[in-house]
Image (cartoon, grey):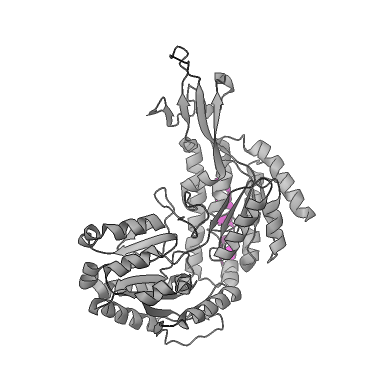
Amino acid sequence: MQEINQIMLQSSEAFKKYRKLSGKQKAPFLRAIAEEIEALGMDLVQTAMQEANLPEARLVGERGRTTTQLRMFADMLEEGSWVDARIDTAKPDRQPLPKMDLRKMLIPTGPVVVFGASNFPFAFSTAGGDTASALASGCPVVVKGHPGHAKTSAMVAGAIERAAERTGMPAGTFAHVDGGDGFEVGKALVMHPQTKAVAFTGSFGGGKALFDMANQRPEPIPVFSEMGSINPVVLMPEKMSQDAENVALTYAGSITVGVGQFCTNPGLIIGIEGTDLEKFLDVLSDEIEKIAPGTMLNAGIYKNYDAKRTIALAQNGVVTESVSKISKTAETQGIPTVASVSGDIFLANPTLHQEVFGPYSLIVKCKDLAQLTEVLGHLEGQLTATLMATENDLKANEEIVDTLRNMSGRLNFNNVPTGVEVCYGLQHGGPFPSTTDGRFTSVGPDAIKRFVRPATYQSFPEDLLPDELKTSNPLNIWRIVDGEFRK
């Protein structure tokens, strides 16, 4: 692993220079990355289509999301208030003890290792949100490209390297490792003493393994793993009595969009048994039968889906309600599937609580609201939770709303969990095991907070303080000064 050692040492050296660059110096770098990605044109999109079995429109949109995200971080750096500057001025005459001058801000932690995701070859991979936020924070990045789209990853890595050269970034600010499927490469990156944080998007097994490795180091480091979830959807009584058919039509699309290969896919739908739930299930089943199987990202993901789907459908008491009636045209196509089970059996069988990554959803038929509440109490942490409800439903069932709020990072009302907006208001991260640290988001500008730490300057001379903390506020940023927001 001599190559890994050399890369990490170079990254550490780059950190000494890169961390000192101002936001206005780093912002052109991020914009240049976006420009270089766009300059690759349709060659990049077509390469990703061939490697990841994703349609052109999806990839064009994802590329746009990726470049928009880079420019969003650039704008944030130029504005500058993201450092969360806090200033408490000295009070030497305070009794009984004088008060020292204390000034705090966020500073970068050091080289970050990013593991590319399989299901988003642009937005969660080489130049995705993890890389963009780490570079914005002032941390060099080392990306381990995903083997499922190795050529795509290499093309994007080249774009980042050209952008770094164009804008005069220190050598080693970015590096790309083509580690293939090698576990040893990932382990070497995580365990290297110069690695100060890790970002990962993928399976629970992969993310938890990296987390455990990082905690076995002599110097433990944070691992921000986004590991997926089943994203429960709760069908409330009044809503179902009014709109069961439309809800079913909406969720047929959400379950199967992108062949179900989103971490926010609605894999669990919970309702109260009765005529309204049966109407919902009838319409949903009819729609699922009409949706063609889709080619999954790669053979490994297909095999995992096929195996977990088979296990889930074989569980005692599980009824296969609907599968696509359209024949597969390729071996690695995932078959859209909806199954159902009683609340009693679901509570007794933890296997049914696990994610089946693909176009699959399980309907849990509860006896009443009390059992529905009990089912929710047995679920683990989730990226999202959804309430299909009227306002009366919400007011009459505060415990259910609170339970969903406490278990999830994003709580939806009369919407679908699929689709993630890149913005300040979005939380993409939830309690374990959906992520290893639910305090942070991996999407949007706040993702930068994963790779920084607070640091205080005490009694420093004005001219030796960072610009963000100087009394004169040369950057004109928002700060908390003596307990008040000020510019």
Residue positioned most to the right? 2
Which quarter of the picture shows residue 412?
A: bottom left
- Residue in front for this viewpoint, 379 or 43: 379
Which residue: 47% across, 62% down? 61
Q: Position of residue 462 (x, y in %)?
A: 54, 19
Left or right of 382, for residue 159: right
Which of the pair 81/233 is nearer the observer?
233
Stretch of the chain drawn in magenta = 30-45
**Horizontal and vertical percent for residue 267?**
42, 70
Name the residue at the top extreme.
Answer: 93
Residue displayed at 47% across by 88% down? 327
Q: Please, is residue 262 above or below residue 482 in the view?
A: below
Is 386 located above or below residue 25 in the figure? below
Q: Is residue 238 above or below residue 322?
A: above
Residue drawn at x 48%, y 60% is 434
- Percent from the top left, x then y, of residue 427? 43, 52
Which percent across, then down, holds residue 228? 49, 63
Quarter of the image for residue 205 reads bottom right
Q: Residue at x 42, y 74 (%)?
A: 348
- In the rendered image, residue 393 lying in the magenta stretch gets the answer no
Does residue 303 appear to the left or right of 179 in the view shown? left
Q: Quadrant of the C terminus?
A: top left
Count of number-bearing discs: 0
- The foreground one among 270 and 476 is 270
